[in-house]
Amino acid sequence: MPAQSSPPRTDSRPGGRSARIRAAVHQAVKELLTDEARDALTIPVIAARAGVHATTVYRRWGSVGELLADVATSRFSGDLVVPDTGSLREDLKRYAYDLAKDLNDPDTLTLVRAIVGTGGENAGVCRMERQRQLEAIIQREQARGNEAPDVERAVDALLAPLYYRAVFTDQPPSPEWARTLVSHLLPA
């Protein structure tokens, strides 16, 4: 009877060598973003800080932009709780308030600015998780049988001004100001 072969692995072991390398590289990126100018962020510098060979980083991520996108995806996934107060207006006010607080965190802001600086499709990673969170709030309101704005309109009214103010101005988005954005989306 021939020996049965196990199916090929399609994922890495959680907690294995791959996870340790990913964690070390992510940590190195975070440290370098706070310690150095963004221009000093190169694959060889990141690899040296992480204690891995540069080819390992190139093989896994390919570019600084891709690596920053991975760090951001990891950072932004599930970090804000999607509120459920029973009121769309209150959910959006809490969400905008929490997002503004997050964007005022120096580490978050440094990461967002670095990703935007790489340009291209990687810049969208800052928006993707936030857009999914807004979708969840809006879909929940629609499931209640209530009218709600479409997601694109919510992104334009809430995410766009918050990220614009955080990334491109010297006037950080205050949590109180962020709550007022909801009135533009949902006039009384």
Image (cartoon, rainbow, N blue to C red):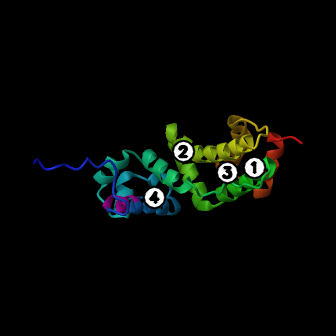
Say whether residue 19 is magenta: yes
Question: Is the stretch drawn in magenta largely helix, strand or loop?
Answer: helix
Q: Residues within 10 Å of mark 3 (few under 14, many from 20)?
A: many
| Dot placed on the residue nearer the N-terminal end, 2 or 3 | 2
Secondary structure of the residue carrying tag 1 is: helix
What are the residue bounds of the magenta stretch? 17-22
Q: Name the amino acid type tagged 4.
A: Val
Question: Is residue 78 shown in magenta?
Answer: no
Q: How many labels, in total?
A: 4
* Residue under numbered circle 3: 166
Query: How far apart are the alpha carbons under marks 2 and 3?
Result: 16 Å
Label located before the other in sequence (4 or 3): 4
In this rendering, would 187 be left or right of 114? right
Q: Secondary structure at mark 2?
A: helix
| Label drawn at residue 29 | 4
Of residues 87 and 61, the one nearer the viewer is 87
Do the residues bearing badges 4 and 2 touch, measured as CB atoms within 8 Å? no
Estimate the spatial distance between the alpha carbons at disc 4 and disc 3, rounded to whole Å: 20 Å
Q: Residue 23 bears which disc, if any? A: none
Query: Which of pointers 1 and 2 indicates the residue nearer the eye?
Result: 1
Q: Secondary structure at mark 4?
A: helix
> How far apart are the two marked residues, 3 and 1, measured between alpha carbons?
19 Å
Residue 149, how many percent across, how many down?
75, 37
Q: Residue at x 39, y 63 (%)?
A: 24
What residue is disc 1 on? Answer: 92
Q: On screen, 34 above or below 123?
A: below
Nearer to us: label 4 or label 1: 1
Determine which quarter of the picture holds residue 184: top right
- In three-dimensional space, the C-alpha distance between marks 4 and 1, rounded to whole angstroms, equals 32 Å
Query: Which residue, given by chain and number where applicable, does mark 2 sit on?
Result: 125
